[in-house]
Image (tube, coloured by chain):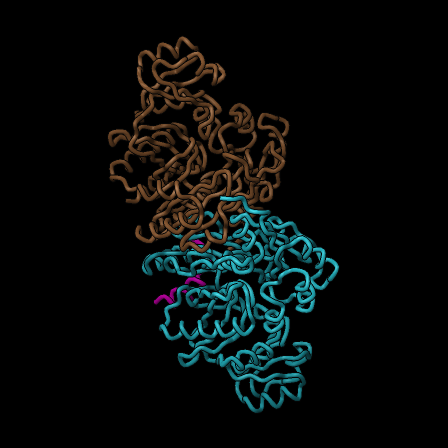
Chain colours: A brown, B cyan
């Protein structure tokens, strides 16, 4: 045996709950963390010596990089150009090109198409005239989304034939957009995958997701799907990761339409739909992201039982009744409550479906999350 | 749903790895932590705003208590009198009386006996004359242990009939001791149990332990034992906890002699032989200790698969080869290496015994821990 040299320091740009859960997973393994975040009260700050600075403050970013062995980020709206500058100095994983692609819905869709990953009908919209032409051709309900800086349902609006297109375009600020045909999807699935520095890949089981008001409300994993959907999703994830020379965890969200996967978007990071892995998989997505970016071997992505993740948005249910539910694991990000803010989640894990259903009924009864539980129960049958 | 009031702050006296793992488990649940420790580099300090002070510095202890909602401790050599003073101010859990009993081998053995928990032959030794009388009567190899302040094999020495008793007594400082007959035990087992504020109890499966140089080297859980040993250990744990009105996790270590449990000692805290619960049980001992001292419901203590815990003492094996072993979970306490110091551990978990054995062979091959693996394999058959 020998002693390790100084434990690596992982820098994360963005100090939200994803950074916090990365830091919790990594601290247990002896890693050190730094975060850079403009908010003084970033919820990862208590676990990772923080630098308070804007995401495009190059001087502070360089000072930050100087204290880290490897750099990652916990959300997409970091400046890809700034990241590219940091990448001259320290390994940035995933690479800035992956971030740049995912930041722009038009680039992302074009890449999906180049890789033969099916997507729904869409059009790139630069001007009102583009929108008018596209809407006339689509002639169906659609969603107009800004190309950049959208998340959790922000930066988008629904339109249908006959609507005032100029008003809709203006409402989003007249910025470059994509117009997506509104899909009558049967369900929403996601795959969380991880690619190591050596190119090895591992895939978590497909997760079924239910959104409310544009924000993830419930995940069920492993999703009940035919094997072909799983192998298809894995193929798409592999193509995407290999084309980007991606390192770390990422997610692809899919709509299922007529039994087929249509890619909606990818997230170049650990993902809300992978939070169940903290208690329901052999290795959590957070640990696997760290293993990947440090060049360590990946951990098993196999599920342990069946999990339902209930997201707590805007407010937290009372903790004591929650902890009385068998197999429930409580995650509180330590953030001040605010409408629409993700404050925490619970993973309910069971070996058997019948137990999971019983535990969800307890959650419905004691935690005031009836809509989430009903949505989960409808999927669990 | 409603928002929680401010998350509770848990104060832990002692900032070692046990405090660190408590803080990791609790931070995930939104708790805040403070630790009081005399060492500037206490390994829990990065997770819990530290106060650097001696364990008997009453002024600092009171200042510390003022910042906490509930107080616990991470090792036994805290002043029970100081804790009793703090208990006037804030809930101290487990209570100071439990600590006082466990700090003194004579009080502890007397309590075991009062509760009909079998112990090996022993005698209380205050003077050299006591030792001479006891040794003459025992007339067998024995271990002389200081009544107080011993741990990890410190504060004890073996003696046999004919040895220089005065030298042995002097070597331990001439302080009050107990003399214990050296037991030809078949195996060492421990039970980790937890008692809630409402008196509810939960028991982890029995764990088999292997020591090297007086320090825990390997744990295997659940231990392969007859059901009667489990129910007996649970009965003993229940008697002990109820007699002390104990709140929190604790461990009792047993020797198995002629198929019978003989209690060796109890630890009024989370315990090294419960570290496997982090990856091999539904709820870790750390989370359950926090649930208990906060008055929250206890979590399930059921095992998930079979676990082997390998303790890293003095040095850490290389991390990357370790992480290549399926089902291995890496825990590094972030401490500077030093001979005899517990620096981390690995839990290797598998659903099936055959897989566990295969993974242990990989550990033997790649981690330089042949003695530990051989000891584990000998028990796993």
User: Where's residue A19, x and y in %?
Assistant: 52, 39
Q: In terms of depth relative to the viewer, which is nearer, B174 or B24?
A: B24
Q: Please tell me in which quadrant of the rendered image residue B380 appears.
A: bottom left
Q: Is B366 rendered above or below residue A296?
A: below
Q: In terms of depth relative to the viewer, which is nearer, A47 or A360?
A: A360
Overall secondary structure of the magenta section: helix
User: Where's residue A97, x and y in %?
Assistant: 46, 25
Report the side of A85 relative to A356 (left or right): right
Query: Is residue B375 one of those drawn in magenta?
Result: yes
Q: Is A9 rendered above or below residue A356?
A: above
Query: Is residue B140 one of those drawn in magenta?
Result: no
Q: In terms of depth relative to the viewer, which is nearer, B141 or B85?
A: B85
Report the side of B176 relative to B115 (left or right): right
Q: Is B314 rendered above or below residue A162?
A: below
User: Where's residue B157, x and y in %?
Assistant: 59, 77
Count of number-bearing discs: 0
Q: In terms of depth relative to the viewer, which is nearer, A140 or B106?
A: A140
Quadrant containing the C terminus of chain B in the rendered view = bottom left
Res A9 visible: no
Residue at the extreme top = A129
Res A67 visible: yes
Magenta stretch, residue numbers: B366-381
Q: Is A179 rendered above or below residue B170?
A: above
User: Where's residue B114, x and y in %?
Assistant: 54, 81
Q: Please tell me in which quadrant of the rendered image residue A67 appears.
A: top right
């Amino acid at each position: 045996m020998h002693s390790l040299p100084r434990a690596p320091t992982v820098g994360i740009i963005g100090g939200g709950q994803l950074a916090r859960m990365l830091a919790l997973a990594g601290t247990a393994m002896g890693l050190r963390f730094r975060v850079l975040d403009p908010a003084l009260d970033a919820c990862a700050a208590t676990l990772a010596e923080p630098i308070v600075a804007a995401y495009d403050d190059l001087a502070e970013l360089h000072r930050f990089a100087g204290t880290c062995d490897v750099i990652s980020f916990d959300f997409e709206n970091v400046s890809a150009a700034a990241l590219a500058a940091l990448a001259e100095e320290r390994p940035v994983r995933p690479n800035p090109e992956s971030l740049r692609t995912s930041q722009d819905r038009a680039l992302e869709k074009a890449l999906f198409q180049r890789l033969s990953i099916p997507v729904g009908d869409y059009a790139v919209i630069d001007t009102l005239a583009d929108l008018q032409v596209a809407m006339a051709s689509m002639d169906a309900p659609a969603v107009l989304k800004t190309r950049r800086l959208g998340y959790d349902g922000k930066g988008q609006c629904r339109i249908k034939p006959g609507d005032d297109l100029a008003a809709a375009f203006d409402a989003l600020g007249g910025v470059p957009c994509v117009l997506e045909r509104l899909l009558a999807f049967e369900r929403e699935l996601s795959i969380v995958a991880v690619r190591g520095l050596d190119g090895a890949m591992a895939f978590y089981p497909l997760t079924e997701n239910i959104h409310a008001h544009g924000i993830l409300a419930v995940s069920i994993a492993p999703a009940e799907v035919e094997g072909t959907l799983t192998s298809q999703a894995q193929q798409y994830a592999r193509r995407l990761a290999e084309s980007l020379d991606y390192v770390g965890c990422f997610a692809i969200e899919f709509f299922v339409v007529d039994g087929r996967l249509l890619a909606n978007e990818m997230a170049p990071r650990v993902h809300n739909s992978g939070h169940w892995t903290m208690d329901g998989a052999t290795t959590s997505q957070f640990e696997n992201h760290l293993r990947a970016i440090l060049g360590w071997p990946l951990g098993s992505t196999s599920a342990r039982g069946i999990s339902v993740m209930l997201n707590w948005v805007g407010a937290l249910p009372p903790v004591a009744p929650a902890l009385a539910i068998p197999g429930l694991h409580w995650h509180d990000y330590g953030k001040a409550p605010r409408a629409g803010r993700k404050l925490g989640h619970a993973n309910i894990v069971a070996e058997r479906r019948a137990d999971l259903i019983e535990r969800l009924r307890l959650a419905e009864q004691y935690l005031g999350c009836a809509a989430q539980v009903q949505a989960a129960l409808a999927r669990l049958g």
